[in-house]
C-alpha cells in the first residue's frame, strides 16, 4: 500500500466513495493503492489518533522498530506502547510480526502499512 488517508466524513461521503469504487470495478479500471479511514466526528478521530499514537506511527513509518525500541525512543512505558500498537493494528494503520531475539526469546517488530499517512479534518 502506498498511501493511507484518515479523514472526517459523513455517511454520504462514505457511500460516494463506495459508488465511485463500484463504478471503477464495473469498468475494469485499476484502483489506486490508497485506503481511506473515515471518522464522522473530528474529536473521535483525534482521540483515537492522539499525539502519542501519531508519534508512534511516525517512528515506524521511518523503519520497523521493536516494542522495546519504541519504548526507549518515545520515553513511554512498554505496556502503553503495546496497548497503542494493538489499537493501531486493529484499525489497520500498522502491522506487527513476532521474530526471534536470540538469547532473549521473542520480540514484536512493528511497521507502518504505508510510507505516507495523510490526515484531513474538516470542521463544520
Image: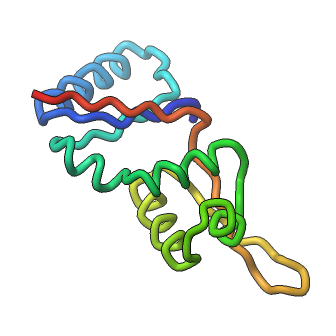
Quarter of the image where one finds residue 115? top right
Q: Considering depth in this image, is 81 or 64 the residue closer to the camera?
A: 81
**Residue drawn at 43 percent across, 16 percent down:** 28
Q: Is residue 102 above or below residue 57?
A: below
How is the protein colored in the picture? rainbow
The N terminus lies in quadrant:
top right
Q: Position of residue 20 (x, y in %)?
A: 27, 19
Q: Considering depth in this image, is 53 or 6 the residue closer to the camera?
A: 53
**Residue drawn at 18 percent across, 27 percent down:** 13
The C terminus lies in quadrant:
top left
Q: Considering depth in this image, is 44 or 51 the residue closer to the camera?
A: 51
Quarter of the image where one finds residue 122? top left
**Residue drawn at 62 percent across, 62 percent down:** 96
**Number of marks present in the image shown:** 0
Q: Position of residue 69 (x, y in %)?
A: 71, 65
- Does residue 109 appear anywhere in the picture? no
Q: Is residue 41 left or right of residue 75?
A: left
Q: Position of residue 31 (x, y in %)?
A: 46, 22
Q: Position of residue 35 (x, y in %)?
A: 43, 35
Q: Is residue 45 above or below residue 103?
A: above
Amino acid at each position: 500500500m502506498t498511501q493511507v488517508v484518515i479523514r472526517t466524513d459523513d455517511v454520504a461521503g462514505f457511500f460516494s466513495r463506495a459508488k465511485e469504487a463500484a463504478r471503477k470495478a464495473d469498468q475494469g479500471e485499476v484502483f489506486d493503492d490508497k485506503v481511506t479511514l473515515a471518522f464522522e466526528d473530528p474529536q473521535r478521530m483525534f482521540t483515537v489518533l492522539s499525539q502519542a499514537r501519531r508519534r508512534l506511527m511516525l517512528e515506524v513509518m521511518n523503519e520497523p522498530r521493536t516494542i522495546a525500541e519504541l519504548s526507549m525512543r518515545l520515553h513511554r512505558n512498554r505496556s502503553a506502547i503495546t496497548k497503542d500498537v494493538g489499537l493501531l493494528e486493529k484499525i489497520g494503520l500498522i502491522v506487527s510480526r513476532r521474530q526471534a531475539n536470540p538469547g532473549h526469546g521473542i520480540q514484536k517488530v512493528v511497521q507502518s502499512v504505508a510510507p505516507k499517512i495523510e490526515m484531513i479534518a474538516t470542521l463544520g
